[in-house]
Amino acid sequence: MPHVAPGSRSDGRLASQAVERMRAATGADVAFAAVGLADLESPRESSVADYRDRLEVAHADLRAILATVDDPALRRRLAAVSDRLCDPPDVGVPDIELSPREVDVLASASLGRRNDEIAKELSLSVLTVKSYLKSAMAKLGSHNRTEAVRLARRMGYLP
């Protein structure tokens, strides 16, 4: 799928088309309703910043749902959707591999959630959340969670 700049006339339509293709392929209406992708409006109908905020929330929710799915085929498909919601990495960005759980935790942290809220959402202990954050921050070379989220976005791990 081609990258479409937020605010362009077709990005809302492309999101709707992607949702419809995933529904047809997986029958995963419940997951998409929970994620909220089906409810994303076109940026023409709301501000681009609001649209981006809702996209970030949808991505974090999708990552949380993905963590609960046992079916490997559905996990791969949902992970692919999650990856497509993120911008492609910048040219010249170092190749750093974050684990899926580190991405899950960073996605929730990007929404301003506290460690205890992230732990509850992802069915982890607070210490495990702290461990994933610490590991991701070390890999990214960041000194705090805000910087880690910014770097993860720049690398294409988060929308």
Image: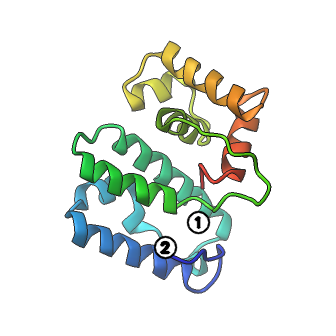
Residue at the extreme bottom: 9
Q: Residue at x 47, y 82 (%)?
A: 13
- Residue 68 lies in quadrant: top left
| Residue at 36% from the left image edge and 25% from the top image edge | 123
Amino acid tagged 1: Tyr
Question: What residue is drawn where x is 59% and y is 42%?
Answer: 111
Q: Which mark is residue 3?
A: none
Q: Position of residue 62 (x, y in %)?
A: 41, 50
Point out the tag, 1 or 2, that comes first from the N-terminus: 2
Q: Nearer the viewer, residue 155 or 46?
A: 155
The amino acid sitting under disc 2 is: Glu
Q: Which mark is residue 51?
A: 1
Q: Residue furthest top?
A: 127
Instruction: Report which residue position mark 2 lands on.
Output: 41
Count of numbered badges drawn on the protein: 2
Q: CA distance from mark 1 to mark 2?
A: 7 Å
Residue at x 31% of width, y 74% of height: 21
Residue 147's spot in the image, x, y percent?
Answer: 76, 37
Q: Image check: 118 left or right of 47?
A: left
Residue 102 image point, x, y percent: 54, 33
Q: Secondary structure at mark 2?
A: loop
The reply to whether the C-beta atoms of the residues labelled 1 and 2 are less than 8 Å apart is: yes
For residue 140, above or below residue 25? above
Camera-nearest residue between 42 and 108? 108
- State the residue in front, 37 or 77: 77
